[in-house]
Amino acid sequence: MHTAFISHPDCLLHDMGLHHPESPARLKAIEDELASSGLMDKLERHLAPLATLGQLKRVHAPEYIALLDAAGRQALSSGLVNLDPDTAMNRYSLQSAYRAVGAVILATDLVAGEQVENAFCSIRPPGHHAERNRAMGFCLFNNVAAGVAHAIEAHALERVAVVDFDVHHGNGTENIFRDDPRVMMVSTFQHPLYPYSGVKGRSERMVNIPLVAGSDGQLFREAVNQFWLPALERFQPQMLFISAGFDAHKDDDLASLNLVEADYTWVTQKIREVAQKHAGNRIVSALEGGYDLPALGRSVAAHLKALADP
């Protein structure tokens, strides 16, 4: 087995309200699709540990971690604490967030230690909007950023790339790494759209490619071929992390891009080609967005099949 699947039941306990799109049902939809397709049998399952405070402090300020800890304690009595108009914590959210980061840390260790070729973290809350000092966009801790920092600090890697195909720009990942020459981020996202960032401040290492509403798989693939792949070839990453958001799917109502499962298969294959050439096949993928449940399940299955295929 060369693909790990990492999750934890604690990730189901984080709940921001009955009608919030970032719901526990997302992980259930993924598990159901993987089980019914038989794909789960091809994966090496692991339970996510809790992240440590030291692992979080690599990417988040101590005072921010303390703020979330205080909000978690408040939620024990009040039931729900709002951090911004879209993001809230219940009494279990902090536990879920520590598991989400812990999943990516474990995935990093498994992949960097050559115990598996690649890994997918089926986790929530998502992470790529979380900045060093700020929760936003459904995100508490930046899960992928913590994994990248762990790869650099614990495994002595010198060049790590983040690939983000969520429909929303990963402003938090950029906030944390834009001044770090060891990290490249390549991304596509709908623009203009929340969080209304990613267009200014682009650089050779922050290769953010905005797509207009209505863009389909052809335009997405052109962006990958024209911008991502040449940038990654120049950078020659030793490990790749994927912020795997599936809300650019045509059935997802939170945005207006028109990707389909075949596009997620294709882009995953392209990322694997880069990893095979430069990174010893090392890829860690972590769930970000994706809110239409049937489309999410099918898209993750397509992504995982492309990761797990020999």
Image (cartoon, rainbow, N blue to C red):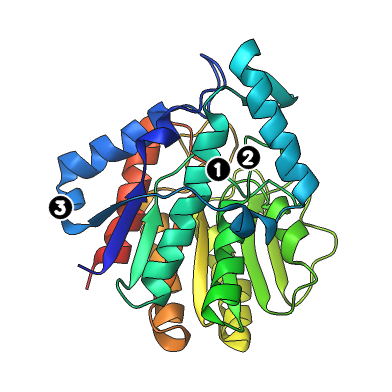
**Which of disc 2 and disc 3 is earlier in sequence?**
3
Numbered badge on residue 139: 2
* Mark 3 lies on residue: 41
**Which of disc 1 and disc 3 is earlier in sequence?**
3
Residue located at (54% from left, 74% from top): 154
Residue 36, position in %: x, y?
Answer: 16, 39
| Relative horizontal placement of residue 69, taking residue 299 as reference (left or right) | right
Q: CA distance from mark 1 to mark 2?
A: 5 Å
Examine the image and state in which quarter residue 224 appears.
bottom right
The quadrant the C terminus occupies is bottom left
**Which of disc 2 and disc 1 is earlier in sequence?**
1
Which kind of residue does numbered mark 1 sit on? Answer: Pro
Residue located at (68% from left, 51% from top): 169
| Relative horizontal placement of residue 100, taking residue 64 as reference (left or right) | left
Contact flag, marks 1 and 2 (Cβ < 8 Å): yes
Where is 110 relative to 60, above or below?
A: below
Indicate the secondary structure of the residue bearing disc 1: loop
Residue 259, position in %: x, y?
Answer: 47, 48
